[in-house]
Amino acid sequence: MHDVETIDDAAAAEASLDPMRGRMLAALSEPGSASTLAAQLGMPRQKVNYHLRVLEQHGLVELVEERRRGNFTERVLQASAASYVISPGALGDMQPDPARSPDRLSARWLLALSSRLVRDVGTLLTGAQRANRPVATYAMDGEIRFASAADRAAFTEELTTTITDLVAKYHREKPAEGGGEGKLYRLVVATHPAVPADRSAPPIH
């Protein structure tokens, strides 16, 4: 079972968003059967079986083992991941496009960039898992408290200059003919007001 998995299929996303199936996925962080889930969730076994078939059809639960119980076989299942992220790719043509209205100071553009990040990294991770290979990634996470809006603006300007200079230092244009082309990476740097642990919207200033 993976720590996190991306859902990029619309039908699988719909299946995962059903409240009852969400409870089942959470319960199946540990292996379980239709019988154990029925007792745990207080549902008829037949109804649990129906939901499990849907989840298994979309690869959200996986067969762990089969146990012979008298005259029937008990199937033991487990969620394919401890948690899931629904990729914007599941929205098809409706997914956000950062190229539509690029604006470094726009919160909506930041959201579109973040959506693309989720989609692309999810696609890379899925392919890497199938090939049993790692994905070369890097992330930085932290917080910064600005004393004023002027400080925030100055930081943004200095960060832009620093990153631009750093990219210019290491970026290599694709050669016209022959030679090593290197590997292209995407760089996303973002700052935004920190969201409190209770997930309520922070004051905008």
Image: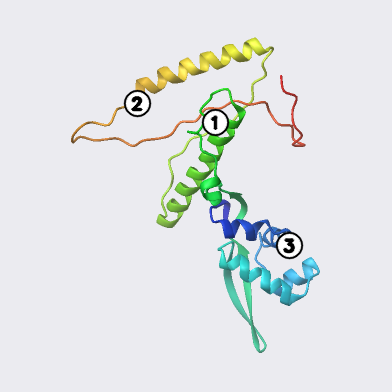
116 shown above or below 147: below
| Three-letter code, disc 1 | Met
Quadrant of residue 21 within the rendered picture: bottom right
**Marks 3 and 2: which is nearer the front?**
3
Residue 82: give x, y in percent of width and height.
Answer: 63, 54
Q: CA distance from mark 1 to mark 3?
A: 35 Å
Is label 1 in a helix, a strand or a loop? loop
Q: Earlier in the sequence, mark 1 or mark 2?
A: 1
**Marks 1 and 3: which is nearer the front?**
3
| Pointer 3 local density, CA inside 10 Å: few below 14, some 14–19, many at least 20 | some
Circle 1 sits on which residue? 140
Q: Quadrant of the C terminus?
A: top right
| Pointer 2 local density, CA inside 10 Å: few below 14, some 14–19, many at least 20 | few
| Three-letter code, disc 3 | Met
Circle 2 sits on which residue? 171
Is label 3 in a helix, a strand or a loop? helix
Circle 3 sits on which residue? 20
